[in-house]
Image (cartoon, helix red, strand yellow):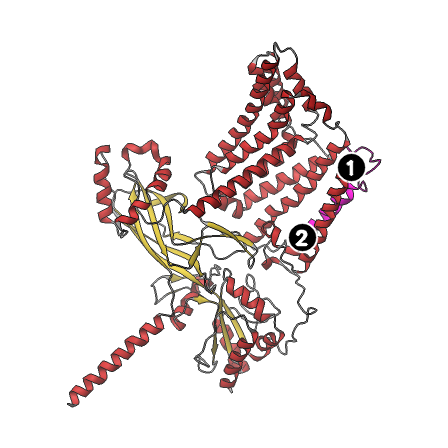
Amino acid sequence: MKRLNVLRTKGIALITMLLLSVFVNAQQINPVSWTFSTEQISEQEFYLIMSGNIEADWHMYTIDIEEGGPMPMYIEFDKSDDYKLVGGVLEFPKPKEVFDDVFNVTVKYHEKTVQYKQKIKLNTEKSFTIEGLLDGQACYDIDGRCVLVTEDMEFNIKPVKIESSEETQAVKNQIKSETNQTDSADDEEDLTSDDKEENAEEDHVSDKKASNPTSTVAQAGTKEDSEEKEKGILGFLLMAIGGGLLGVLTPCVFPMIPMTVSFFLQGQSSRAAGIMKALIFGLSIIFLYTLVGLIVSLTSAGADLTSILSTSWVANAIFFVLFVIFSISFFGLFEITLPTGLANKADQQVDKGGLIASFFMAVTLVIVSFSCTGPIVGAILVKGAASGSWLEPTIGMMGFGFGFALPFTLLAVSPNLLKKLPKSGGWMNAVKVVFAFILLAFSMKFLSNIDQTYNLNFLSRDLYIAIWIVLFTLMGFYLLGKIKFSHDSDLKHVGIFRLFVAIASFSFVLYLLPGMFGAKLTPIASVLPPMTAQNFELKAGGGSTVEIEEALCEEPKHTDVLHYSNNIQGYFDYQQGLDCAKEKNKPLLVYFSGHGCSNCKQMQSFVWEDTRVQDYLNNKVIITKLLTDERKELPESEWYESEMDGRMKKTVGKQNRDFQISRFNMNSQPFYVLINPKTGEKLISETMEYEKDPEVFIEWLDKGLAAMK
């Protein structure tokens, strides 16, 4: 009986331990499940395929996230001499987009499913294994909490020699059987259409290629995604058409209208012949600009141009310099023209007459007008190429060409309309100068990209807005005739249209002013630096702050890249915070956060703004903020191999994340814990997550202070 009681006692203890284990581990949230597979596409080329299923009511952020937004998906592959990466990571389906008023940027995310594909080229004929890491962020739609999505990857590469196209299906079956792919047959069916589109690029090796990959997620988007995509393209097309119409009003183009139209009216055997030449002229302009867009589309299709435009200092510096040069030219310092030989050769072909003359007349107009239309064309190409859709530069240039050709064609068909056009004059130079001010303003965006990407901190948000305020104020005074440039004619009076544009300019300046003091300016936030780059912020309630009674023990680590908001002082390293809390005999408040944690920012906005909370954080506890997505690499002496996953932890964020999971069995943020500095254990069992009520947060802090006493 005694032995039976012992067994019973041990059984109860074992069950209790299992239940506790389930409870504790349930704190760790993993809303994305992954499968990894490979697809052989030639004897030396493979696709590494990463397929993710996202739980209902969750969304996961994409690879392409604007600077200042939430944490993007990072995909890293261990380096090896056995292979090399070819191109960038492909992402399916097209992500959804929404403006996030917390980060003040447009964010992209996936729901339900996602797939990434990386092409590789083998340097060996032997089998080998590729390892890597997925590192991203997912958020819950119901309460807004976010968790880091981390997954170790392993791909077994087993090359199979493909001797003939008849063996393709057998190769596919062999590859599928040797990989760790676990997708169901129903899911395989969903992917066919998208993969055909993807594999169309590989037609040149079609006789050596295996069939399309089968996976659950690289499928055509939902009807809702399709509608959003169509709306985005339509809006971009209309903007491009507007740009073409605007280009006609520039000083390089507008004076050419009468001369160009008269070309189609003189020496024609019939009215129909003149109209035919006018139509060929218009279609030729559309063709020429579409050709430019097609070239950009084809050259950007194989590269991650979006990432380059948002992160490469070289690309952003080039665009900044080009915009500044064009603006200086528009102010009248010098004239930018293409080589005159091009225009002369095209003009010689015009003299030969015939229908072909209409085409070369279009070529001549496009070349001559470049000095004025170049910035508009450049802006459309950059916008289209940065959209992530390789077709958009072509669509944009086709729209620009249509808008640019439309007035010429209509006037050639109905020459009586020429009499109603305003005469060339000083107003055209005013259009050019207004363009110059706008170009200077938008050149700042490229400078800001460099500053934000490389943490240079030379262009704060308030300084950026101040420059815009000065530029648009000067533009308003120019339109009223208070400022005059060398090419301007005397302004005897201000026209009605000019007056309204000046009113719009001054109104925009007044709208920008609150941004100097921390206003979000949501409608134009996408072209401004993020709120994290704001140096001066006017506090609610007259800007009152809490007096800090005593300084911290020592200078916090990582202040070269990390900072507190809301006039809070604290640490960014757990051990440093613990040592100071022990020295001052105060509770240690450990706050797990992230750059890309929307709820963290919201809680700081709602709770940390309260001066009572600021008093607690500055004077009654020692706070250490541990960012789980900070990518600053630590010195090699501080690296360690995690007992949780066996991987080397080299960055601040990865070590903080490993600490949160291993110590507290939690991987979501925000997450607050109160620690007794003497024992290193929790002061109270309760922890704090997302909370918008300062009273609740203060009540929780009071429990910790009482326990400390």
Residue 80 in view (yes/no) = no
Q: Mark 1 is on which residue type?
A: Phe
Along the polypeptide, which appears first: circle 2 or circle 1?
2
Q: Give the range drawn in magenta.
A: 468-495
Which residue was labeled with disc 2? Answer: 465
Task: Assess whether residue 694 is covered by the magenta stretch.
Answer: no
Q: In which quarter of the image is residue 379?
A: top right
Q: Residue 485 carries which label?
A: 1
Q: Quadrant of residue 694?
A: bottom right
Give how far across and how far down residue 76 sits, in percent. 39, 52
Residue in the foreground of this view, choosing between 421 and 335: 421
Mark 2 residue crowding within 10 angstroms, few (<14) / some (14–19) / many (20+): many
> Height in image: 143 above or below 358?
below
> Height in image: 446 above or below 581?
above
Figure quadrant of the N terminus = bottom left
- Mark 1 lies on a secondary structure that is loop
Give how far across and how far down residue 295 sits, in percent. 49, 32
**Left or right: 401 as drawn, with respect to 641:** right
Mark 1 residue crowding within 10 angstroms, few (<14) / some (14–19) / many (20+): few
Give how far across and how far down residue 312 sits, in percent. 52, 46
